Image: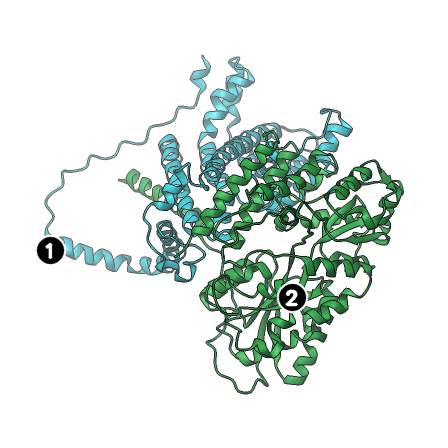
Amino acid sequence: MSISDTEPQLQPAQPLAPVPPELPPDPALTATARRHSWRRNRFAWALIAPALIFMVLVHIVPMLLGVYVSFLKLNTFTLPKLFGAPWIGLANFKGLFDSANPLHNGFVDATRNTAIYTTTVVVGTIGGGLGVALLLNRSFPGVRIVRTLMLTPWIIPTFVVATLWQFMWQRDAGIINKILVDYTHVLSHKPTWLLGDNTIWAIVIPSIWRGLPLPMLFFLAALQAMPPELHEAAKMDGAGAWRRFRHITLPLLRPLIGIQLLFGVIYATYQFVMPYIMLGSDPGPKADLLMTLIVRQAFDNNLFGYGAAISTLLMLAMAAWVALWYLAFRRDLEVAA
Amino acid sequence: MRRASRTRLFILLAASIVLALVVAACGGKSSSSETTKAAAPANNIKGATVTMWVMNNGPHPVEDTQRILKPFEQQTGVKVDVKLVGWDVQFDRIKNSAVSGTGPDITQAGTTQVPFFAALGGFQDLSQYTSQIGGAGAYANGIWKTTQVEGQSGTWAVPWFTEARAIYYRKDALQKAGIDPATAFTDWDAFNSTLTKLKAVKDVGGKPIKPFGGPGKKAFDLVHGVMPFVWTAGGSELTPDNKQSAINSPQSAEGVEFYANLIREGVFDTSALEKDGQGVEDMFKGGQLAVWIGGPWVLQAAGRADDPKWSDAARKNVGIAPLPKGPSGKSFAFVGGSNLMMYKTAKNKDAAWAVIKYLSQDSSQKAYAELMGMFPARLAPQRQVGATDQNHKEFLQAIEEGRSYAPIPQWAQVENAYKSSFGDILDTAAGFGGKSYSTQEVQKQLDAAAKEADTLLAQGA
């Protein structure tokens, strides 16, 4: 029996009962049915109404207003007019893509940095979380203590994490360089982390450190719920650890990886606290993320139209990501449901 | 059917998540929770309550302000409700409250912020009142200018307290290097020579010390540290008509380059560039720097035993000198401080003005400035504080010879553009960021800053 025989076969969804051809609706019957349906569901609508109104007021309306602002010339002089500021169409968006505009370079830098940050943090947290979960899915003395300790970074607020790492990254007094240079001699000179090219890593590494425990927790729970018979049978058939991981563990974890990817990318793309606390409102060309750029242009520089334009583009990018993700993981969701 | 509804449900959920996060991205900062009703005429101020926002000017900003105002409250029967708004959020909170009309009655504002806040239209023109406090004649010209908006009539604020930047040096370090403090910082050459000699002083009292340090782009006041060198080189932040940036003029570039060259010459501790202004201030207090540029509050802090950041050696050896003269033959320091502004929506304008008037008396100015370690804004008490000792005399000279920025509404944004540029230039000089440092590179970065500033200056309704 080959390993592929032991691979869990994903069952296709049950075929649906044949749908009878639709008949032309009877208007009188349809109206009655609608009234009946409304009466039947009235109570349910009443129950969800507060949440619905809250969602519309707190989510939908501000979002639409944010998009509206992206078409306005809302700046220092027009701020008192707020939504009555002059309408300038797509000028704010065009400015972002016009290399002659002084704000163009900042937008390009922030977009590049956000892509690097999101990719490395998502890969680091999900990959690292899976690796640690596999290590902790074994029994060894003190495993419970180790599992608890591994969760520690997750319970520390991001603000505190950023503040602590800011001290740790300092070139002369920081513990990182002391370990790398003074204690272990891994490097011959102390690198500067909080300025220049290394700044992106100064925010990526603490973000992975802070974000790793949550995926690890999910993966560990999933690994422990996995039927051991699958691995045992594969082992008896001579499958090595890698093949068992590749053909049993990974396919079973796929839906969980999908969910982690969805939230991980959105969370990382909207990261603000880490660079802001560690590097200030202007983290520099190598670590400025789209969120710090939005806040700086909109709230420090009063260029609300530009800020809203970048926010709108970011929203569209995230919508595209969700659509892409849905296409990739639709099958897993159906199985999970 | 079930599958389709699941799909729809999922899409709805996913869309909600995206929307929620986008709203978080688009959402503005909350406006003030302070609620003030429309102004009502009041002939009698007794019994009125005036709400006042102050920033964290010292270790106990609310208590100190209340202490100064206590005699006023007893004399007039006006209650002053002092509330703290941190420097980190004050710009947004004052801006939001001015636009929404839901602010306190009075607020403290940074001198360079006044033109922007005034442009929002939510503040009271105080021209009708200012004769009661002596008007412009009671203040130094540069300080009174911070209450005006370029090209407009009206007085939008009253100066409250003043500060200027000067050189702090360690007397013991200079002594060890054989430098006479009287001539150590007179001009750029002397400044350079002093720092070069201090480079040879590796430690003082067994503790390692670096010649000089200043903050990098993380400091909100980086521009205040660099602009004095631009001014002394004959440069300027804007053209005389305030319509265009002048930060890329040859004189301005010379000033920026002089400051950045301190890094190239190895007298500037580049680890300071990682820190904000407070971080570098702590380096000087802790005895790690022989020379540093700072404000008068640090001088006051040296005398306070409850400030644990001071090393004994640093505390005992603080010396003050004005900033060096440059190619222009002049020395300029940045002069800042805070003003008081009255909201148009103040419930009882007479009572609000009475508070501002009381805080503008010579005696209360002197008492409050001493508590904060600042200088009074008014000339008479300013000179009294300046006569305290030699160090205070040096600060008074810095204030009297100092400069501030053009009083235009866009200044805060232009300053942000300059801050980014100066930060990048200093990083490049220190070898961070992958660019090679040269005069041409400095010019290129200043040209980019000037272009951004010109765009900001050109914005209008």
* Image quadrant containing the C terminus of chain A: top left
Residue B156 is at least partly visible in this image: yes
Whole-number angstrom distance, CA of label 1 to CA of label 2? 86 Å
For label 1, count other residues whose C-alpha is less than 10 Å away and answer few (under 14), some (14-19) or many (20+): few
State the green chain.
B
Q: Amino acid at mark 1?
A: Ala
Disc nearest the viewer among 1 and 2: 2
**Residue B282 falls left or right of residue A6:** right
The kind of residue tagged 2 is Ala
Quarter-of-image position of residue A57: bottom left
Mark 2 Cα within 10 Å, few/some/many (few <14, many 20+)? Answer: some
- Of A251 and B315, nearer the camera is B315
* Numbered label attached to residue A186: none
Quarter of the N terminus of chain A within the rendering: top left
Measuring from the top left, give residue A248's x and y in whole percent. 48, 23
Q: Which mark is residue B140?
A: 2
Instruction: Give the label on residue A28, or none.
Output: 1
Secondary element type, mark 1: helix
Please name the residue shown 55% across and 87% down the image: B44
Residue A192 sits above or below residue B397 on the image = above
Q: Is residue A22 left or right of residue B426?
A: left
